[in-house]
Image (cartoon, grey):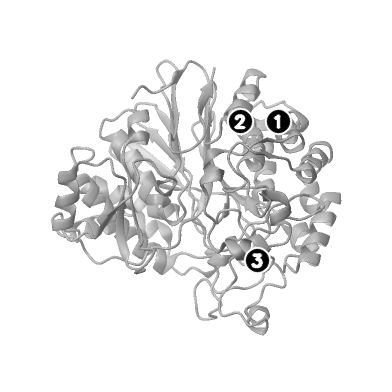
Amino acid sequence: METPVFGHAAVAAPHHLACETGQRILVQGGNAIEAMIAMAATIGVVYPHNNSLGGDGFWLVTDTRRQVRAIQACGPAGAGATIRAYRDLGHDEIPSRGALAALTVPGAIGGWQVAADMARAFGGRLPLPVLLEDAIRHARDGFPVSPSQGRVEPREFEELRAASGFAAQFMADGKPLAPGERLLQPALAGLLDQLGHAGLDDFYRGDAAREIAADLDRAGSFVTRDDLRCYQARLREPLSLPLPGVTLFNLPPPSQGISTLIILGLLDRLAIRRAGSFEHIHGLVEASKRATAVRNRILADPVMMTADPAAFLAPAFLEREAVAISMSRAAPGPLPGPPGDTVWMGAVDDQGIAVSYIQSIFWDFGSGTVLPKTGLLMQNRGMAFSLDPRSLRALAPGRLPFHTLNPAMAHFSDGRLMPFGTMGGDAQPQILAQVFSRYRLGEGVADAIDAPRFVFKRDSTSRHPILFMESRFDDALYGALERAGHPIDIGAAYADEFGHSGALVRHARDGRIEAMHDPRADGGASGL
């Protein structure tokens, strides 16, 4: 498959309208960070089943000096979100839908704010109303529902339909909107217009914050006006993993970025030679099991963690783990977590600024709670908390939930820059490792993204772990994996369950950029 190539700058996104927004900003002289802020606003309007302004975001940015910066834009549990409060309401676990699922502060807008400051430091001059222009228009005038949104079969649908404001916004005649039907979000357009004129800080400390807090209170959420007022997205030091010829970067906890790095560190030590071979797929699965076991054992809000993530990226640890992998037999694995819905987008400009960004509301349509004054669809990321006070991830006000989001970046020793990422919830590290390892083993960007995938996941009936694979692998490979002890289920040729991934590669020698987004989604790549 031919990879689209651009001469100066490029963007990639899972929806064509977000691509168009990013390209428009680049044409108007914006840098990659400004393009991503504008794309984040547009995708938050046109892909509501996978993300919204009421969710969280994680950024990796390579600047003009090839320094990598991480923005952690995830919100904490609200002041009223206590274990006792949920127990008193009769819950043994946090509900998946409704106001009680909307228990964390939306962090995405705070991340846009930090990114905007960064963009200005590198010459960005476009005003905020210009960056938000497309998002406002699509929310106000409407747009056709995407095929991806139309394919969604929401989990716990009755609870979702009952969530405050959901049916009025996303259903018609008792059914979810079908592909091609027009979706209008006038209240959300008003919120974006307000932010464009008053500034992004208004979301947390201005008139918008007042309306959001009042609606959350009426809905029964545990997030308060003070929770909004106190929120700030944070710059963090990214995790890094040096491998021969390349250094990989990802987000620190509470993101599961460490899982992606562990998988790729282990795969490097298994000396795989051919993409798509039994050794490649088996090695990825076994490495994913070991990375997931580490993640499940140590990962939580950083203030609760006792383990140092860097210790699990040290050569001695990775070598011990790699030696423990049998290249002929499947080992027992930890039970994978639930799937999630997310968007990954990338951007690279002619200065060499590269952005890898994920924005999410966790499950499809998040909590389902739509705030009437602002049209804000609230996430249900707080489901990652436990109501067991002994758990490392125990719920408490101000605590950050565990996050599946982990945008990735690679710096090659020959000067190439590669932002890459995927949606896929718990399986994101597996999908990222498949895409990157195929590219590193010699496949082109488009071929690495188009190639058939697997996810090691929970079987929907038995709840046991299975290896779920697309139907495009060679029949001999399925047989070899089964003989090695992998329980296999075969799905469709291209399916949302295997993630919407993307990547861009900027070549240092001539500045050209290869860019691709997943054929499983509704977008692509655009550029100059």
User: How crowded is the residue under tag 2: few (<14 C-alpha within 10 Å), some, or many (20+)?
Assistant: many
Classify the position of the C terminus by image quarter.
top right
Figure label count: 3
Could you tell whether 189 is left or right of 338 in the image? right
Could you tell whether 434 is left or right of 150 in the image? left
Q: Is residue 3 above or below residue 280?
A: above
| Residue 69 visible to the viewer | no
Q: Residue 46 in the image: state x and y as whole percent.
A: 63, 39
Seen at 43% across and 21% down, the residue is: 4
Looking at the rendered structure, the secondary structure element under dot 1 is: helix
User: How crowded is the residue under tag 3: few (<14 C-alpha within 10 Å), some, or many (20+)?
Assistant: many
Nearer to us of marks 3 and 2 is: 2
Q: Of the residues shown, which amino acid type is indicated by label 1? A: Asp
Could you tell whether 323 is left or right of 108 in the image? left
Seen at 56% across and 66% down, the residue is: 383
Looking at the rendered structure, the secondary structure element under dot 2 is: helix
Q: Residue 141 lies in what quarter of the image?
A: top right
Q: Residue 368 lies in what quarter of the image?
A: bottom right
Task: From the image, tell me which residue sits under label 3.
Answer: 77
Q: Of the residues shown, which amino acid type is indicated by label 3? A: Ala
Residue 17 shows which numbered tag? Answer: 2
Query: Toward the viewer: 101 or 73?
Result: 101
Disc on the earlier residue, 3 or 2? 2
User: How crowded is the residue under tag 1: few (<14 C-alpha within 10 Å), some, or many (20+)?
Assistant: many
Could you tell whether 237 is left or right of 203 in the image? left
